[in-house]
Amino acid sequence: MSIGSTHRAAINAFNAAAVKPRPVSHRTIRTAFLDENVDLPLRLSDDDVGVVLDRHGCDVFTVDVNNERPDQEAMAIALFIVECVNEAAGFTEEKLDA
């Protein structure tokens, strides 16, 4: 799944106008997810291996839906993705715990 065309166009236009491309802002990442009805930050499900949920506990995606990987691998992959998305959106553990 990719960022919606509106957001991708805005990101491409911003990068094209810049002398040196800059990272996408936290606000842009959060808005792109909100436009897809995903309220960040993401988190792992406590009940289901590889299931990633949004702030409200709604399913966002599942890693290894066919159970082809050991549970530990699926959990690690899901955690890596969650950490990357949350960091890109400006969430850190310190902010989440506050």
Image (cartoon, rainbow, N blue to C red):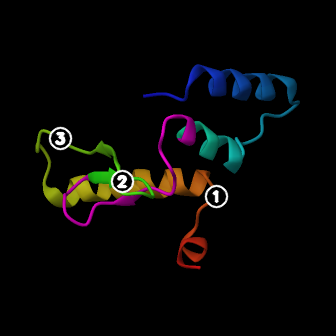
- Residue 53 got which mark? 2
Q: Position of residue 43 (x, y in %)?
A: 39, 60
- Residue 90 got which mark? 1
Closest to the observer: 59 or 52?
59
Q: Mark 1 or 2 closer to N-term?
A: 2
Which residue is under mark 3? 65
- Classify mark 1: residues with Cα within 10 Å, few (<14), some (14-19) or many (20+): some
Quarter of the rendering occupied by the C terminus = bottom right
What residue type is disc 2 on? Leu
Q: Position of residue 9 (x, y in %)?
A: 68, 20
Seen in the picture, residue 18 relative to 64 is either above or below; the reply is above
At x 58% / y 67%, what residue is drawn? 92
Q: Position of residue 27 (x, y in %)?
A: 70, 47
Is residue 43 in the magenta section?
yes
Marks 3 and 2 in Cβ contact (< 8 Å): no
What residue type is disc 3 on? Val
Measured in 3D between alpha carbons, the distance from the residue under mark 3 to the one under mark 1, in whole angstroms, is: 28 Å
Quarter of the rendering occupied by the N terminus = top left
Quadrant of the image occupied by residue 12? top right
Seen in the picture, residue 71 relative to 27 is either above or below; the reply is below
Where disc 1 sits, the SS reads: loop
Quadrant of the image occupied by residue 23? top right
- Residue 21 got which mark? none
